[in-house]
Amino acid sequence: MKMKLLKYMLLSAVLFSAPSCEFLDNAPDGQITLEMVFNDKTRTEEWLAAVYNRIPDPYTSMMQNYDAYADDFSPSEGWEAFGWDCISKIYGNWNSNSSWNGDFWLALPQRIREAYIFIENVRPLPTQKLYADEAENMKAEARFLIAYYYYLLVNTYGAVPLQTTLSDFGETFDQLMIGQTPYDDIINWIDGELLAVSKILPANYDSETHKYGRATSIMALAVRARMLLFAASPLVNGNQDPDYLKFENNKGEKIFNSQKDPSKWERAATACEELITAAHAAGHALYKEYNADGSIDPFMSYCNMSFKEYHQGNKEILFARSSCDYGYMEGHAAPRGWGGQGGLGVTQSLVDAFFTEEGLPPVLGYDADRKPVFNPAVSGSYSEKGFSAIPDRRTTKWIYGSSDASEEQEINTVVPAGVFNMYVHREPRFYVSVYFNGAYYKSAGRALDFYKGGLDGIPPTSPWDAPQNGYLLRKRIHPNTNIGNNNSIRPYRPGILFRLAEAYLNYAEALNEVGFEANRALILEYVNRVRERAGIPLYGSAQIPAPANQAEMSDLIRRERRVEFNCEYAIRYDDIRRWKQMDLLSGFFDGMNAQGTKKSSDETDANAYFVRGFYYPYPRAFNDKNYWIPIHQNQLDKNPNLRQLPKW
């Protein structure tokens, strides 16, 4: 009976294509037997390529159907009519009958089944130069993909059925229609698999670029470290919510352990340490570029961290999808006046999160009326009134801040004179990440014009193709992209899913939870490694004191994560979830006055552009149920042994 299942699964596996590098070519068409596949090296590789197919593309659907739920991205509200149902979900229009275009529940188990079939059938083919060691390595790759896909499932749905072998059609209905496995049991199984394959897989494929994107030991350790950090966090470690306390599977087993277990933080810290040690040994390091005087150029370093490839020296990359549809994001983020959709922006809260040039947060939080609470320590260098009288110039080769910038100059203008003071004297990561009204747009050779009726602002028609709150996304949008006048130039870049900076801040967070006093120096070391590359003063330096206690350290780590990983795949939404901070995604969100026509910060003038105000017509309505994606009702109807997630 198992052979019947294998043959049944054949077409659903072989006919998939995988969009990455020359290894991930299209699978063959036609009805072929299992023996034909695994007696042929090319078809064997194409089967494995199909298993790789569902590694998420961080530039397309997961940005739209995952990252957009958090408080970094601000997609145009009008795009709901064009399939961006994240807008409706943000407003709270979401239930167990709603579709979720991330589609993990259906798509990932299919790939998992295909991986199990591969493991059972792949064999050495010496006459075709597929030798025993390569076949064993490919099995390890399939095991990695099974573990990774289960990580994505459990991270998304919280409770999923875990199958550690291939199902047999000869089994009974109850054996096939299994219920959910307790969360910690799934984590433990994935942990064991990732650790096991990390001892088999190579650390990298630097000398074989045609294999770039295939599983490595570093990728396995990176997934493991991120997963164990989530598993140690408050959402699933000591969550006393009544709905979680009573959440059981069909066997009466508790899905989540409600008792806080400090050892989970120790386990996460150890996993992060093991990842960092292995990554350093394999040659990984934060990506840095340097000025002529030998100092780090934070603008070029943070900018090209997203664009340079591994073989170009970007050893910060730990796990990347080698082929992505980055043109999708770029088209939506490019300004309307230069041929783009011009409505993929970022939130004001993200703008507020970036530090000043002195390395301090200008906004500490918000009062009950959503008014910013300013940091008194930066009161002399930060203002939300008026406009700069002189250019903001820095030591950098970054040439995207002004028309007079040049790579031949050691000092360049990053913000021209006349820019709203909120955007002056901010840290380098801000300028690399955010387009604001008046920012220089190199492809067009002009400043962005977001005023209502302006070149890039709200037009009389198509009002959705304009920044609804005064900002467009800049991070990961290649500065040489040119889609104006139908001239579509989109330079290649890898789809980075994990990078070394995350390992550093994950480690710092876990160590802080294990013990602030005992680990204070090591925590600061790893936080400061990230800040050094960012070009801002270090904690514990003459400019900024070190945190005095665990709470202060936790706050600064969370602030650093918000800035460093802004608008990167999955990180911010996962952080909000695991920290149990869903309140951040409720209520009105504010930005600049996109209806404004005047270059003014006068709060009494309705036409002043540079004034804070709410931009969504309705408040966001995410709540405690949104910590997990719901299982669709049709799946619950098919399998009576499944149980819906808490509060859904």
Image (spheres, rainbow, N blue to C red):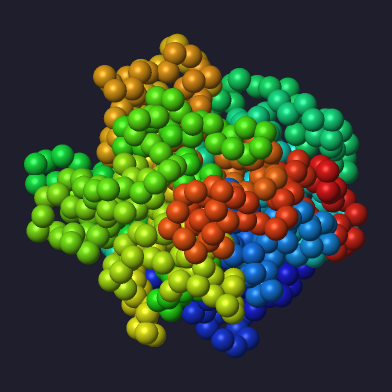
Q: Tell me the residue at 48%/52% (across/down).
A: 610
237 versus 386 height, above or below? above
Q: Residue furthest bottom?
A: 30
Across and down, in percent, residue 494 comes to 38, 62
Q: Residue furthest top?
A: 517
Say whether residue 166 is visible.
no
Q: Tell me the residue at 38%/65% (across/down).
A: 448
Could you tell whether 488 is left or right of 630 in the image? left
Say which of 516 and 103 sits in front. 516
Say whether residue 75 is visible.
yes
Q: How many marks?
A: 0
Across and down, in percent, residue 219 comes to 43, 48
Q: Quadrant of residue 264?
A: top right
Say which of 442 and 175 sits in front. 442
Could you tell whether 479 is left or right of 367 in the image? left
Q: Residue furthest front?
A: 604
Say which of 99 and 267 sits in front. 99
Q: Tell me the residue at 78%/57% (across/down).
A: 94
Say which of 558 and 404 sits in front. 404
The quadrant of the image that shows the N terminus is bottom right
Across and down, in percent, residue 253 comes to 83, 35
451 versus 516 height, above or below? below
Across and down, in percent, residue 572 comes to 54, 45
Q: Tell me the residue at 84%/30% (across/down).
A: 242
